[in-house]
Image (cartoon, helix red, strand yellow):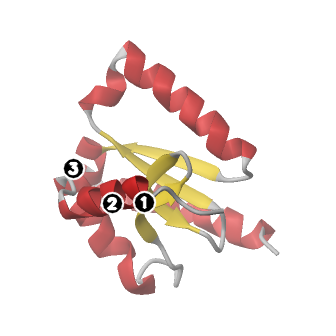
Amino acid sequence: MKIDPQLLEFAKIMRTNATEAEHLMWQLLRNKQFMNLKFRRQHVIKPYIVDFYCHEIGLVIELDGSQHNTDDGKEYDVERTKFLEALGLKVVRSWNHDVLGETDVVLEHLWSICTELKSTSP
């Protein structure tokens, strides 16, 4: 299945213009630093671009800013999550302010989810 070149270009732009929380999370996840898992950032899962993705355990990590706390944002996120879960993926959402202010708590939560997914993946 060929991916829309515009979607790939947009993902590249998003990597360049990462939020502070995305930048911090990438520093913690990149190069298999977290549980020896390979993560990709701004990864295309058509028709969406997810913030972080680990193919090995089927995990999507989304970092949400204030726009996700509106009615439209919440509705969009529910649709998006249902779509990704229908593909057999686990979706984890964290608020940007939690990633920046309570990094340890976010990572502990992520650690427990990854541990569970690693134990159930083939």
Q: In the depicted view, which residue is nearer to us: 33 or 112?
A: 33
Residue that sits furthest to the right in the current view: 122
In the rendered image of this protein, does residue 110 appear above or below residue 94? below
Residue at the (43%, 48%) spot, across then down: 62
Q: Residue 71 lies in what quarter of the image? A: top left
Q: What crowding class fits label 2: few (fewer than 14 Cα within 10 Å), some (14-19), or many (20 or more)? A: few
Q: Are the residues at dot 1 and dot 2 in contact (C-beta closer than 8 Å)?
A: yes
Please tell me whether mark 2 sits on a helix, a strand or a loop: helix
Location of residue 6 in the rendering, given as x and y in whole percent from the top left corner? 38, 54
Identify the residue under disc 2.
9
Question: Identity of the amino acid at label 3?
Answer: Gly
First in sequence: mark 3 vs mark 2:
2
Q: Residue 11 lies in what quarter of the image? A: bottom left
Question: Identity of the amino acid at label 2?
Answer: Glu
Residue at the (46%, 62%) spot, across then down: 43
Q: In the depicted view, which residue is nearer to us: 58 or 43?
A: 43
* Left or right, residue 66 beside residue 91: left
Identify the residue under disc 1.
5
Q: Which mark is residue 101?
A: 3
Image quadrant holding the C terminus, namely bottom right
